[in-house]
Image: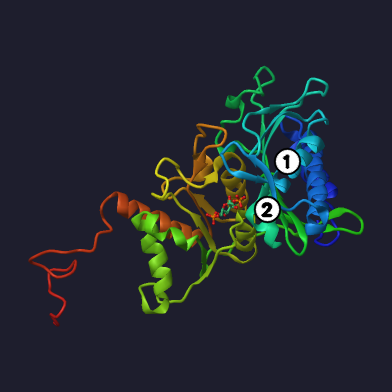
Amino acid sequence: MQDGRTTLSKFLIDTLDRPPCTDNTRDTAGLSALLIDVAAAIKSISAMLTKGALGGNYGSAQTLNTHGEEQKKLDVSTNDIFVQQCEWDGLLAAMVSEEMEHVYPIPPEYPRGEYLLAFDPLDGSSNIDINGVVGSIFSVLRTRDPAEDASSEAAFLRPGCEQVAAGYAVYGPSTMLVLSVGNGTHGFTLERDIGNFVLTHSNIRIPEETGEFAINASNERFWEPPVRRYVQECKDGRSGCRARDFNMRWIASMVAEVHRILMRGGVFMYPRDSKTPAMEGRLRLLYEANPMSFLVEQAGGLAITGRERILDVAPRALHGRVPVILGSKNEVERIARYHGEYDRGEDKPFSSPLFGTRSLFLPDFTA
Ligand code: AFP
């Protein structure tokens, strides 16, 4: 498949609807059609966003979502676009969205399919009124068996490793769709003049090394020690134990942060913090952490909560949250190691009334 010439439809036909995929016990043609409907929703949202303030969509919807957060007008209208674009085609059994409290079963007037779609229709919506980068995130599961009540919460409460597809749209200077169906992570750029997504970034790979990290530093006093240790070492730069300088970013849009990491490496952290102890983390598992972790792992990166692989986490609620640390393999492994050392009490600086550092000899001893 050639960057710059392969459209999304051709990519999906070549990837899903021809051997070896069609050798699978279950047909994947429906998945291609579903992803094309999701892409159509993304094109509609992209067209709406480019109108900016002229579209009359800025500002608050004067409503709260299921999490008690104020909804922007675009949160509601982008959610409606996803629902209207995907509910009718007989491919879905149900949907879950950040903007809807309960599972949205496919209405009886439409045929039901075998897939489940979970999505955040507009991620980073606090950036809308400042014309910042925003995105949409989606995750696709298959119902386990036709007899399952797909409109139940239980149908969605599956670990992220069971996803059959995941992706995001990033609405930046260009609109891109980045997706995986389990054979690598691939990027498509919207060719507005013809309305096609064209393959421009095939087989994205995240560099294993990086000198860039992203975290909301205003929460520093609430972080756990292993996170504070890692960030402090990055800030110490070449004068500290890492012996090299780092750079920091924070865009307040997970899609923009993850896209940067897929393009040039880096680490994104929204760790557990004591700011709201009852919350496991800030980001939602089903339609933010899981799809992003799927894409990152398919691109050679890692995605953890700090103590376990995100894709192994068993969801307990539709809108449950998790800590998220993802990106370049070597840095995420280091952060995981710091959490392990902290949990085992091994990260305390060595102190003893009798001996120097970890050796028996005091530091000023020279042989
Ligand atoms: P909004 O969609 O409410 O703007 O939240 C965006 C987000 O879920 C994620 O995309 C960002 O990384 C994170 O929240 C930003 O959180 P802070 O507002 O605490 O920086």
Q: Residue 132, located in which quarter of the rendered image?
A: bottom right
Local packing at callout 2 (Cα closer than 10 Å; few below 14, some 14-19, many 20+) is many
Closer to the camera in the image, 255 or 334: 255
- The percent coordinates of residue 89 (x first, y second) are 83, 31
Given the current orientation, which residue lies at the most extreme top position?
147
Which tag, 1 or 2, sits closer to the chain's start?
A: 1
- The percent coordinates of residue 255 (x first, y second) are 64, 55
Query: What residue is shown at x 45% (from left), y 42% (from top)?
Result: 279
Q: How many marks?
A: 2
- The percent coordinates of residue 223 (x first, y second) are 39, 55
Local packing at callout 1 (Cα closer than 10 Å; few below 14, some 14-19, many 20+) is many
Name the amino acid, label 1. Answer: Asn
**CA gap, disc 1 to disc 2?**
25 Å
Q: Is residue 177 visible?
A: yes
Residue 35 versus residue 57 in the image, above or below: above
Q: Is residue 19 visible?
A: no
Q: Residue 114, located in which quarter of the rendered image?
A: top right
Given the current orientation, which residue lies at the most extreme left position?
354
Residue hosting label 1: 79
Mark 1 lies within 8 Å of ligand 1 (Cβ measured) = no
Residue 227 versus residue 321 in the image, above or below: below
Q: Secondary structure at mark 1?
A: helix
Q: Secondary structure at mark 2?
A: loop
Q: Residue 149, located in which quarter of the rendered image?
A: top right
Residue 72 versus residue 355 in the image, above or below: above
Query: What residue is shown at x 40% (from left), y 76% (from top)?
Result: 243
> Given contact means CB atoms under 8 Å apart, are the residues at marks 1 and 2 in contact?
no
